[in-house]
Image (spheres, coloured by chain):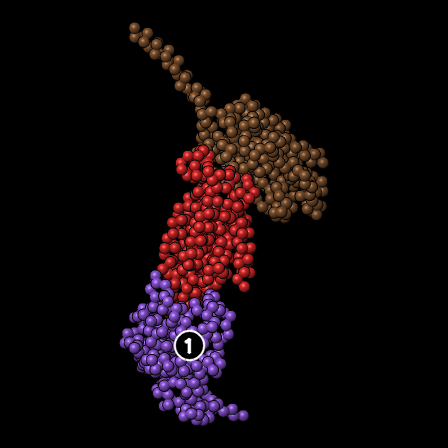
Amino acid sequence: MIRSLLALSIIALLAAILALAIGSVTISPAELWAVIQGEGSALHRTLLWELRLPRTLAAFATGGLLAVAGALMQVLLRNPLADPYVLGLSGGAAVGALLAMLTGMGALLISGSAFAGAMLAMVLVFGLAHGTGSWTASRLLLTGVVVAAGWGAVITLMLALTPSYKLPGMLYWLMGDVSYARTPWPALLVLALAIAVVMPLARNLNVLARGSMQAAALGVSVRPLEWTIYLLASLLTATAVTTAGSIGFVGLIVPHMLRLVLGNDQRIILPASALAGGTLLVLADTLARTVIAPEQLPVGVITALLGVPTFLYLLHRSR
Amino acid sequence: MRYRWLSLKIALGLLIGPLAHPLMASETQRCAVDDAGQKLCLTAPAQRIATLSPGATELTFAAGAGDKVVAGVNHSDYPPAARKLPLVGNHTRIDLEALLALKPDLVVTWVTGNPPAQMELLQALGLPMFAIEPRSFEAVSSAIERLSVLTGTEPQGFAEAERFRTGIAAISAQYRHAEPVAVFYQVWETPLMTINNQHLIGKVLQLCGGVNVFAEMPRLVPRISPEVVLQADPEVILTGSVEGAIDDQLDHWKSYPKMAAVAKNNLFYIPASPISRPTPRLLEASRDICQKLDIARAR
Amino acid sequence: MSTLHTRDLIINVPSRADGFPLNMSIESGQVWGVLGPNGAGKTTLLHTLAGLLPARSGQVTLHDTPLAQLKRRDIAQQLGLVFQERQDSFPATVLETALIGRHPWLSAWESEQAADLQRAQQALAALDVEHLSERLLSTLSGGERQRVAIATLMTQNPDIWLLDEPTNHLDLHHQVKVMRLLREQAALSKTVFMCLHDLNLAARWCSHVLLLYSNGDACWGPAPTMLKPSALEQLYKQKLMTVEVDGAPVFVPVCSN
């Protein structure tokens, strides 16, 4: 278990170093080392400390948040097709962000609005699913899917009514872009806290994954655990979407890939998801900003292009 | 004795006074207020300018600073010299690394076109930013003049601004008493989009004595249905023609032969680029449109 | 050794009037069989005894403490349940599934130890599924999955074993094997309480029987006194013929054309 986590950590570190080294301006390892030591040209120092390092950290944090949220959602809903957005969180965040853009607010207010939208979505789905008394996984899923569709309709309406010059900005937000992140520290903090909170619960999650009745029979307090997971997954997703818009695929594919290789023990899957999700997004973001530079691609496209073949390969090999 | 002291003080005051005047300060400080209301002061004329939208590129060249521009974005295609510029991405998503590597000392941005998050980051890094986006003819001239102050090319800039001003005034005088012509300007075919008179294109139509049938629409670029156009029944339908593409955007109106514009064959194409950007090329575009309206008046 | 008591327990079968209050003393060493037609509430009773469903009235006490006052973890250390319906769940191997049974005994930070692993393997061997340890649960037959479920309960090793139709899907050989295992556990001072749809199994293997009627009536007691043909015929609304084999009664339904 430790071995696989160690391997993932090393890969994550290598990916980060790669991200710091390459870009529209190539910084050689020697120059990189000089900058770390405090010397190096002003341009290289600005590029590394002001642009690449915050961006790489934000990409890692966002990828980790999404992957862990995806793993938690899949356990909560006992459904391998669940991803962090299935319950409408990204829809709510998008409506919040687009409203802020529509009324011409600055980047900080757009982020705040997105977070508020995600929290509203979380409370809405929770209340609707809970309202009639039986809070089963399938009821939650159904409520979430319907509410997500509702948000989608609102987003489409907003896109239809917005003045044309605001459209590109909105579309880019919807596609997800790590360069929006002004500071990576909130996201990193939330990720670290989430892992700290969820690790003691990981074995309970293994049992919960066998079915909620079975889990109750084995001594798990199912309802409080499910609420905690729902709250945690929502917080992680909201933070990720607030940091970098709605980036797809990471939350769905990373936990799956890890399960194919590492098995089903949540005690391994959860920290591994954080590491692997972060790594995937760091690599994807590096490609997104360099592959057709100076054109910048949306990172969500790259995560799909990287993630899908990798996943299919692993699936094929696991037969 | 007292009077001599006084006259000495007055003489000194008259000498030092002008030296402390802002005019003197303009030798060391070049200041201008941009279209977002921010004041920018440079201690020396900008030598390495980055222009982050096609319109910004054009206006900077018009200000006479074309040889100082070191970076443009996609579609910076006018003047032709701008096509050779190193590109730093699209105006909606800038490659910040490439931009920084070119070490600009002035970044000309578009108020509504560039992503706020990236612009805030550039501001935080200490780059001098100047945001423009002219919304009227006078604003075009003013933008050129203000840019030329920052770039130290006042003679060319002010001359170009004045040329534009006089040109527009001449057209205005020429067409002040012209017969009004009802016009529909089609911005896009599907979805069908037009402009109101807040938009510069609307102002051009007004200049030439045209009456924009959608002048009073609440939105700047409204999306409409063919029915309201049929109801308005304009005499002229205008649209922009893209270089290299076939002009067929107005063909769909031919299925309504009873429309005044279709019956009189007043479906006109004008070059899209000059009319779409708030730059000195609006002069040529205005002359073009006025000419088309004259043709319509003759029919 | 824990004992399970019910005090005026009335289980909650939706849209059915209150049944007969149950006052049972389920003690160690006993093997209980619950018999009744479909819909009588056998599964509901089992889940109520496990604390998974609230009773309509009355209470269940475990070692003289009402279930409602005990923590779920404490209950799970004394009481285990094999469900009738399999729930949708994530893929897992047979060994992983059996190991889940140790959950009530491990604290939040503990990992499964060698002793836990050994217990799981022994349980799998007792149920004849050890050779399937690394197979995914979803690839097994119904009978094999049933045996894994029972092995999980054995790994959990509580004092009280609740089983809902444990012989479902099992072939004859394994039916006998499982019933024999349950009786052995009772002999080791465990308490076995199970729902059975086959009254002959109850006749053969149970020490005590509870009859649950579809209208909520109930009676319980030692097996020989409960397994009277007249009562059983009324229970199942089916004419029966009694035969004796090996000293135990066998009930055969009569098809009257």
Q: Is residue C212 above or below residue A236?
A: below
Residue C43 position in % (x across, y down): 41, 77
Label 1 crowd (10 A; few <14 / some 14-19 / many >=20):
some
The residue nearer to you, when weighing A47 against C87, is A47
Chain identity for the colour red used in the image: A
Q: Position of residue B69 (x, y in %)?
A: 54, 30
Q: Quadrant of residue C47?
A: bottom left
Q: Of helix, strand and loop, which one carries label 1?
A: helix
What amino acid type should be assigned to the residue bearing mark 1? Ala
- In the foreground, B83 or A67: A67
Residue A62's spot in the image, x, y percent?
45, 50
Q: Residue at x 41, y 87 (%)?
A: C204
Out of C110 and A301, give the one closest to the viewer.
Answer: C110
Which colour represents chain B? brown
**Residue placed under numbered mark 1 in the picture:** C126
Judge whether residue C142 can be spotted in this image. Answer: yes
Q: Quadrant of the C terminus of chain B?
A: top right
Q: What residue is drawn where x is 39% and y is 83%?
A: C33
- Work out whether A236 lies above or below B163: below
Q: Quadrant of the N terminus of chain B?
A: top left
- Could you tell me residue A263's position as x and y percent? 46, 62
Q: Residue furthest left?
A: C64
From this view, report whether residue B49 is shown above or below residue A138: above
Q: Residue at x 60, y 44 (%)?
A: B193
Chain of the residue that carries numbered disc 1 in the rendered image = C
Q: Colour of chain C?
A: purple
